[in-house]
Amino acid sequence: MDNGEPLEHLDVLVVGAGLSGIGAACRLRQKLPRSTFAVLESRGAIGGTWDLFRYPGVRSDSDMYTLGYSFRPWRGGKAIAQGADIREYVTETAREFGVEERVRFHHRVLAADFSSTTARWTVVVERPRAGGGSETVRLTCSFLLSCTGYYRYDEGYTPEFPGAGEFGGRIVHPQHWPTDLDTTGRRVVVIGSGATAVTLVPNLARDAEHVTMLQRSPSWVLALSSRDHLADRLRGRVPEGLAYALVRTKHIALATATYQFTRRWPRRAREVLRERVAARLPEGFDVERHFTPDYDPWDQRVCFVPDGDLFRALRSGRASVVTDGIETFTPTGIRLTSGAELPADVVVTATGLNLLFLGGMALSVDGGPVDPADRVTYKGMMLSGVPNLAFALGYTNASWTLKIDLVTEHVCRLLDLMQRRSHRIVVPREPAAGQREPLIDLDSGYVRRAAGLLPSQGGATPWRLHQNYPLDVVGLRHRRVDDPALEFS
């Protein structure tokens, strides 16, 4: 039972023990060693996404030299790493920096209310009861830092497919992969064309009778080496920290330049991507239909294929691509809009995510509810008019952790300033009325479905997201934290 009395007060509460939350906890230990903090995790393990996703072949979609933390080198041999290796890296980091014991598992944040009188958040948390069942308790904190990402952990997105109930096989979503599912010698249809689909197809094709990637429309796909040759050459020849910094800088520069090229010269970028795909596919393959989207690169995310494994599976004949619509499921497979039928024993719905901001916690200030969709983001990390709250969202066009590192470092600088000046409250002022744009500048389905749930970004700094790491280094690491857009009291 919730008796209404707070059990404990902490300087900082971090919500989420994934890549972002553990990074934030390590920063707090490094930069603010005298502050008290805890990490609340709704699940039972460290790792977030990399503990939740267990489908075959799950891996990073970014190189680990930038997806890894700036303060702890990635020591794995592969730049594109498997999910289990990333999970172990996050767990080892928590252990090495002494934050593992700060994580409180099975603690789900339900709501948080800020009091302007006490300058504290009262956070309502659901947790297991000692004798069984669950209970709600209250904690208070001076600053709340949400590191929950932006999608729902308890369910992925699956559209309603006509006739799905008549299908005689098994339908699974990659977000909750069944441990007892064996696709050996079976016919598998993977519905989707995004990062999850292009990962699943070559991995399932190793043992399945045949795997078909069924897509309504194609995505841009680019093959990359799973190893970094510069890292391999430097390993053991120069100090580890220097080698990591050099390789990390190379990847940052390459990713930034590539993104800028695709946005400034989209027609040429389309040609380059199409040529690279065509070079890896059998002669006569319909590249235009199956691998040439009608949108420009980075209007939606580009899918990376380590060592071209998807193209090898297609060349071997163990996998194929079908671009068509779904008319209905049948007892033995899927009938397409064209009238053709795909036989299937297993259907994998790699159809995307459901977005969820701040882990779904209900926010209020002085008892008045706060709808994040009505707010504008400050530096992509705070909400206008909401005191003593920050959130960590990574890049959509580069490694997630690059932005997270900058955000958590900036939060520590902000908290240090408040302590030194005896400020108890910091709040981004409401920006002047003007241009507002979606927070995530992608045209992907999961972003469109979340319209009305996420806050907006403004038209100019500091209310605008740049999706540009060098610019954010200047804005978050080197500029003063007592920004005129912030009100301290």
Image: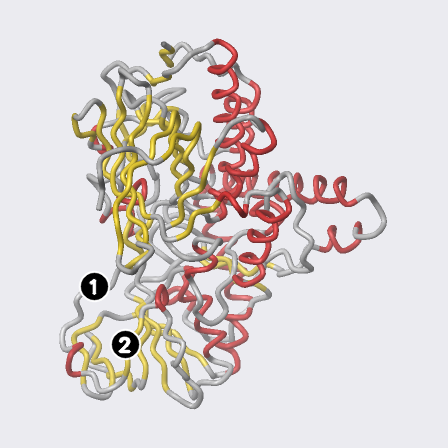
Outermost residue on the bottom side: it is 185
Residue 298 in the image: above or below residue 405: below
Q: Is residue 316 left or right of residue 159?
A: right
Residue 243 in the image: above or below residue 350: above
- Identity of the residue drawn at 43% across and 90% down: 185
Tell me where residue 441 appears, x and y as whole percent. Answer: 34, 39
Q: Which mark is residue 328?
A: none
**Few, some or many C-alpha atoms within 10 Å of disc 2 (few <14, some 14-19, many ≥20)?**
some
Tell me where residue 219 appears, x and y as whole percent. Answer: 39, 58
The colour scheme of the drawn protein is secondary structure
Foreground residue, 90 or 1? 1
| Tag 1 secondary structure | loop
| Tag 2 secondary structure | strand
Residue 398 can be seen in this image: no
Foreground residue, 460 or 51? 51
Q: What residue does disc 1 label?
A: 159
Instruction: Inspect the image, locate mark 2, and give the three-letter code of the amino acid beneath it.
Output: Ile
Tell me where residue 175 appears, x and y as whole percent. Answer: 36, 64
CA distance for labels 1 and 2: 12 Å
Q: Earlier in the sequence, mark 1 or mark 2?
A: 1
Q: What residue does disc 2 label?
A: 171
Tell me where residue 84 appears, x and y as whole percent. Answer: 54, 63
- State the image quarter where residue 249 is shown: top right
- Identity of the residue drawn at 48% across and 76% down: 314
- Identity of the residue drawn at 31% across and 86% down: 345
Foreground residue, 302 or 209? 209
The mark lying in front, picked from 1 and 2, is 2
Foreground residue, 147 or 325? 147
Residue 390 in the image: above or below residue 354: above
Q: Is residue 219 left or right of residue 114?
A: right
